[in-house]
Image: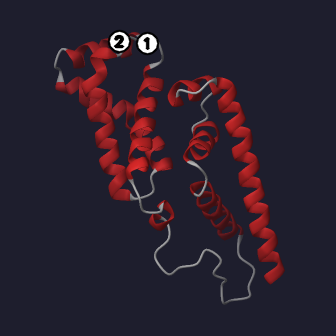
Amino acid sequence: MTHSRSLVAKIIAGDTGAFKSFILQYQRLVSHIVFRMIFNQADREDICQDVFVKIYQNLKEFNFESKLSTWIAKIAYNTCINFLGKKKTPLLDDLISEGQSLDTCSANDTLPDESTVKNDLSFRLRVEIEKMPVHFRTILTLYHLDEMSYNEISEIMQLPEGTVKSYLFRARRLLKRKLLSKYQREELWN
């Protein structure tokens, strides 16, 4: 944490090189959160820039009561939530071009190779997760993909730890129910 404190002190003192180093150090964390919550590429870039502007503007207020990475993740999360609250168009449109169907079947009758099946499953998971309420989607992402603890998620989302656990349980159950329902329907057509 000593490195973080000295880096923050340099940035507050006006060292632009220190802020560039800071961005390089934390851009992966910020982009990981933003890219999991926002699917449109242009929006992602704007939001990542906005996150670092907010971090720079508020760095003087950070007092190291929590981990710097948790504070940064919280800013990234809140910026995404604010963006999603303002966006009126369905987020699924960012993933699928107009006129395409998620259930489009392939014309060939050959068995797909393993990588195709994995890619299809990954796509279906992303689509189903995207349809979930923002809190469920975010908790699934932070817990399973970012491997954050309940405590860290609680700090980022400003929710009690018990609520985080409850949302995670309900999100998993909802996702499982949606996937089972979808696969059972597809099996009927095959």
The picture places residue 72, in percent across and down from the top left corner, at 41, 28
Looking at the rendered structure, the secondary structure element under dot 1 is loop
Give the quadrant of the C terminus.
bottom right
Neighbourhood count class around disc 2 (C-alpha, 10 Å): few under 14, some 14–19, many 20 upward: few
Q: In this view, does 59 lie to the left or right of 35?
A: left
Neighbourhood count class around disc 1 (C-alpha, 10 Å): few under 14, some 14–19, many 20 upward: few
The picture places residue 32, in percent across and down from the top left corner, at 47, 43
Q: In this view, does 118 lie above or below 76?
A: below
- 134 or 68, which is in the foreground? 134
Q: Which mark is residue 55?
A: none
Task: Name which quarter of the figure residue 150 lies in.
Answer: top right
Kindly tell me whether residue 21 is visible in this rendering. Answer: yes
Residue at horizontal 66%, vertical 90%? 107
Q: In this view, does 44 lie to the left or right of 100?
A: left
Task: Name which quarter of the figure residue 117 lies in.
Answer: bottom right
Q: Is residue 103 above or below residue 87?
A: below
The picture places residue 64, in percent across and down from the top left corner, at 41, 12
The picture places residue 185, in percent across and down from the top left corner, at 79, 74
- 92 or 18, which is in the foreground? 92
Distance Cα–Cα, label 2 vs label 1: 6 Å
Q: Which mark is residue 1?
A: 1
Location of mark 2 (residue): 5
- 9 or 73, which is in the foreground? 73
Residue at horizontal 31%, vertical 28%? 55
- 152 or 107, which is in the foreground? 152
Residue at horizontal 29%, vertical 40%? 50
- Callouts 2 and 1 close, C-beta under 8 Å: yes
Amino acid type for the residue under numbered disc 1: Met
Residue at horizontal 43%, vertical 49%? 84
Amino acid type for the residue under numbered disc 2: Arg
Give the quadrant of the N terminus.
top left
